[in-house]
Amino acid sequence: MPESPLDRELGQLLAYHDEPDSSEFVANVMHDVKRERLLRRVILWGFGLVGALFGLAGAAMLSDSITRLFTFSISLPAIETAQVALVVVAAAAFYSWFMNDEMSLGS
């Protein structure tokens, strides 16, 4: 079956005529990758900071006074127990985030 003029015209339009300069192409792609990586880091840092601020605000709302956190007696009432648990979990989360580490519970 012979090709129609429309098929030939479409083939010419879709044909790729010039080969791109490979080094220029690679440089452009790497530039775009670096820009996207930077954008990703900025977004992650921004949302991380907002999350940290909300975490600090929540911790401040849970604790009546930061000094009571360190001056409670041996008998732990409910609010001090919650405060201790909050500090332990916050310290573990900060350590895990800062050290980029996974805490495993066993093998």
Image (cartoon, rainbow, N blue to C red):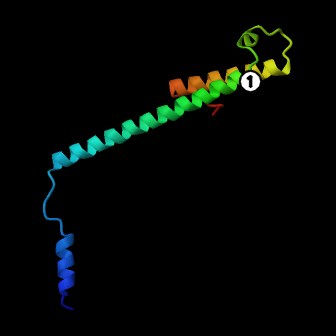
At 84% from the left and 22% from the top, the residue drawn is: 78
Measured along the vertical axis of the image, is residue 52 above or below residue 27? above
Name the spot of residue 26 as percent of width and height, x first: 22, 46
Name the spot of residue 31 as percent of width and height, x first: 27, 41
Residue with the most extreme bottom position: 1
Residue 75: name its quadrant.
top right
At 52% from the left and 35% from the top, the residue drawn is: 47
Of 65 and 92, the residue lying toward us: 65
Of 26 and 62, the residue lying toward us: 62
Name the spot of residue 86 as percent of width and height, x first: 71, 24
Q: Report the residue marked by disc 1.
A: 62
At label 1, counting other C-alpha atoms closer than 10 Å, the crowd grade (few under 14, some 14-19, many 20 or more) is some
| Mark 1: amino acid | Leu
The local secondary structure at tag 1 comes to helix
One can see residue 103 in this view = no
Name the spot of residue 51 as percent of width and height, x first: 58, 32
Residue 65: name its quadrant.
top right
Total count of labels: 1
Measured along the vertical axis of the image, is residue 87 above or below residue 36? above
Task: Locate the C terminus by quadrant.
Answer: top right
Of 38 and 54, the residue lying toward us: 54
One can see residue 10 in this view = yes
Task: Locate the N terminus by quadrant.
Answer: bottom left
At 19% from the left and 72% from the top, the residue drawn is: 13
Residue 33: name its quadrant.
top left
> Is residue 26 rendered to the left or right of residue 61?
left
